[in-house]
Amino acid sequence: MAREFGAGYSARNLWHMVRFGEVFPDPKIVNALSTQLGWTHFRHLLPLDDQLKRDFYAEMCRLEKWNTRTLRKKIGGMLFERTALSKKPDKLIRRELAALRAEDKLTPDLVFRDPYILDFLGLKDTYAEKDVEAAILREIEAFILELGAGFCFVARQKRMTIDDRDYHLDLLFYHRKLRRLVAVELKLGDFEAGDKGQMELYLNWLKRHECEPGEAAPLGIILCAGKTQQHAELLELAQSGIHVASYWTKVLPRKQLERKLHEAVRLARARLAAGKD
């Protein structure tokens, strides 16, 4: 075939063409994606067998205008499995992706992830919270890339005076698409119940003193070394706009990363199913 019609018709390219027709059968969706995605983007998406995962990467790539290198890195870093969205039932995932496709509507479940991979900080085996914060500020561009597109840095050690007492929030960001402030607290140890109260205090202060008209209520991210699932469930963090996530300062080997994240997704979906019974 390549000898008769040219190098573009090699067996490999023909496979890509057939596969493209199989996984992207809707011309309207293809036309919408093609405004931002080139053929090389699509080629990175074709090997993904899970339709929801493929749709997630395609729509996020379109919305956040990823280049092919970023798309490849996001897939390799298993971004989908690290989002809160991936832990939901397939029906709800389809609904959120449909809203993203139709309205460019981002939700916190699409934005927040767990864990956050902070291997670029270059931290040694022993470090303090101030070391993590300093490393993040030193590598702020890479940190925002890991947080996701739309995050804008606002302040570090944001001072809040409450009843003549000063409190300091580690990091404050603004998310352009969500149109809300995002407070980030760093914890070296595991998540504790008291961390929720501290973050609620910060979020309520920000809502009262920092929110502009038309902005949604602030959200909080507590980055910690680990968390216990029962604590997170019983505290009903989502109702307070708080997301607790672990952070990894070293990347696991690919196979180990896959096992760990797939198990986390399986357990989260099992808990959701059990809660409906």
Image (tube, grey):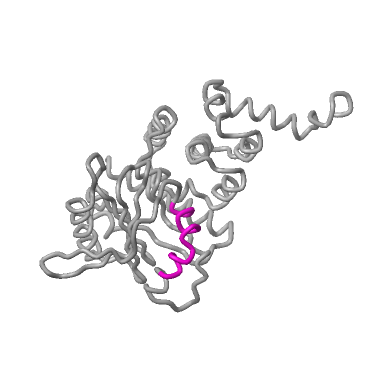
The verdict on residue 140 being magenta is yes
Quadrant of the image containing the C terminus: top left
| Front in this rendered view, residue 57 or 38 | 38
Magenta range = 134-147
Query: Could you say where residue 27 lies in the image, as x and y percent from the top left?
Result: 56, 20
Count of all numbered marks drawn on residues in the image? 0
Quadrant of the image containing the N terminus: top right
| Front in this rendered view, residue 231 or 6 | 6
Q: Is residue 78 above or below residue 38?
A: below
The verdict on residue 73 being magenta is no
**Residue 110 placement: quadrant:** top left
Is residue 73 shown left or right of residue 274? Answer: right
Residue at far right of view: 3
Query: Could you say where residue 112 lies in the image, as x and y percent from the top left?
Result: 39, 49
Give the residue at x 35% y 45%.
Answer: 108
Give the residue at x 69% y 28%.
Answer: 17
Give the residue at x 62% y 34%.
Answer: 38
Query: Could you say where residue 45 lies in the image, as x and y percent from the top left?
Result: 60, 38
Give the residue at x 89% y 28%.
Answer: 3
**Residue 245 placement: quadrant:** bottom left
Residue at far top of view: 27
